[in-house]
Amino acid sequence: MATTLEAPTAGLEAGAATMAKPKLHGRAFYESIGSPKYILAPMVDQSEFAWRMLSRSFIPPSEQKNMVAYTPMFHARLFKDTENYRQCHFQAVRPSDSTDADTTKTPTPEAWLDGNPSIDRPLFVQFCANDPDALLGAALRVAPYCDAVDLNLGCPQGIAKKGKYGAFLQEDQELIFKLINTLHKNLPIPVTAKIRILDTREATLAYAKNVLSAGASILTVHGRLREQKGHLTGLADWRIIKWLREQLPPETVLFANGNILQHDDLQRALEATGADGIMSAEGNLSDPTIFSPPPEPGTETREYWRGRDGKGGYRVDAVMRRYMDILHKYAAGQDPPSRRPLYVPGDDTAWMEEMDRALAEEEEPERKKRRRDTPGKPGKSRALSPNYSAMQPHMFHLLRHFVSKHTDVRDLLAKSRAGDLEAYEKILSMVERKVADGLLEYERAGPAMFEGDEVLGPAAADAEVVEEDGESSRGAVQRCKRPWWVVQPIIRPLPKEAMAKGAVSLSKKDKAKLGEAAVAPEAVNGKAAEPSVQDKVLETDDKVLETDDKLLAG
């Protein structure tokens, strides 16, 4: 059945009430959307509707307005000119059926997913652009369905350099002013912008003032240079964001981005930077519960696990369940499967035995052949949905630590197809079964099951003794490490660690910036030191992060 998205005119009519509201600016606008402190970052193909819903689902209803979410970064020219591109990336109104008998009536567009006022607000839509007219044309198409339009000035990837957008516009401050000012003057909703810091505080301040004078209502500052990506990502500089806060007018709304690994880091960043809100990107991909405070001891539900040392986190099977239920309900438009309660030690284990028998039967040769003959490709409409196309990368982020131990689940994920909910339900069943084994083993052996894992040893039990000096990522690993059945961040090795392992070679200019003189002599001389357990953890995490920078918009 052929379907098409509503024409722009119909979309604008649907948002007439929103468009009729007076346009607010700066802090007045920020306060009108609830003065959110937590910000889900724009991430290429990764901050789509289903993931935003999952991230919001852990926040109590009374606190929902304390978080604002961004869409993935969209290409302004393609969004303005190409209907298929819009259909594949932004689903604000339910597609109309082109086979309707009565073609004389113009149906009223029905709010659907992206920007739905009842479930997906506040929402900012982000574009990359280098043409003011194209940016305005794209922004007008989404204006009825969001609270603000954001200009990406932070993407540091090669594709942004080739297309001249993102962080590669920062040398053209006149064009940046025109892009923002065009939206400020002609768009019925506010414009915001996200930048990276420059080489000096003074240059960064001038950059920020240019963006604000052009009309940006909110300025997000990523505390890293354009060159800080991949192995050179390093730590974001909260000090320069704090300095900007002190130099800019108090009515300036400022968001800070960088260094958020766990929920407690959000408050640390607020205090250290003086920003109005804190943005999380990679931290949210690995742990979509990051904006929700952990439950008080003794109030945990089955979704949350707490160890004998008091440390804990949400279980990967619980988070994956929520994600799958959202896909069933909103993307597929069907009721989620009936599910038994999440297993906790002490529950009946009959289901585990039944699952083991079922898995054993599936491994028989005839069953294998039958599965090869019927691959079950999803329909075209599912393959085109942004909520389905993001499934595999999301699961590799969420289950990163899990699949490093359970490679059979990793292999199934690698073979999975976009939109194949049945296959992902099977993966979820395997995850639940293996988490149950992990919980039982922990009950039997306790912390002893982690003997040999330095990052979970006695020194990790007290977070207060963990030192993070900016020279090593081991302190962060020690602070954040949890058992593999708990969602947790991936810790990037710092640049000096990457150089010591031979993972990256630098130009003389970059070496001077990073102070290579502090690198261990044995690394400089080409001799690799014997890796510790923590080194191995960092090396594994480094490998799985190699593709992440392509997904993050800066």
Image (cartoon, rainbow, N blue to C red):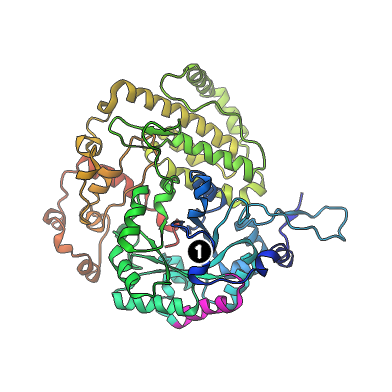
Of residues 379 and 5, which is closer to you in this image?
5
Of residues 382 and 62, which is closer to you in this image?
62
Q: How many marks?
A: 1
User: Residue sitting at 44 percent across and 76 percent down?
Assistant: 211
Image-based side of 363 in relation to 259, left or right: right
Image-based side of 90 in relation to 402, left or right: right
Where are the magenta residues, as a range? 174-189
Residue type of the residue flagged with mark 1: Glu
Image-based side of 317 in relation to 184, left or right: left
The answer to if 500 sits in the magenta stretch is no
Q: In the picture shown, does residue 57 fall above or below 41? A: above
**SS at mark 1?**
helix
The residue indicated by pointer 1 is: 31
Q: Single out the residue that lies furthest toward the bottom.
A: 174
Picture coordinates of residue 23 (x, y %)? 59, 72
Density class for disc 1 (Cα within 10 Å; few <14, some 14-19, many ≥20) is: few
Picture coordinates of residue 475 (x, y %)? 23, 47
User: Residue sitting at 39 percent across and 77 percent down?
Assistant: 207
Picture coordinates of residue 51 (x, y %)? 52, 48
Image-quadrant location for residue 368:
top right
User: Residue sitting at 37 percent across and 39 percent down?
Assistant: 401
Label the magenta part by its dominant secondary structure. helix
The answer, for residue 508, to whether it is visible in the render is yes
Of residues 158 and 306, which is closer to you in this image?
306
Q: Single out the residue that lies furthest toward the left.
A: 521
The quarter of the image holding the C terminus is bottom left
Picture coordinates of residue 273 (x, y %)? 32, 63
Image-quadrant location for residue 137:
bottom right
Image-quadrant location for residue 244:
bottom left
Q: In the picture shown, does residue 361 fall above or below 89? A: above
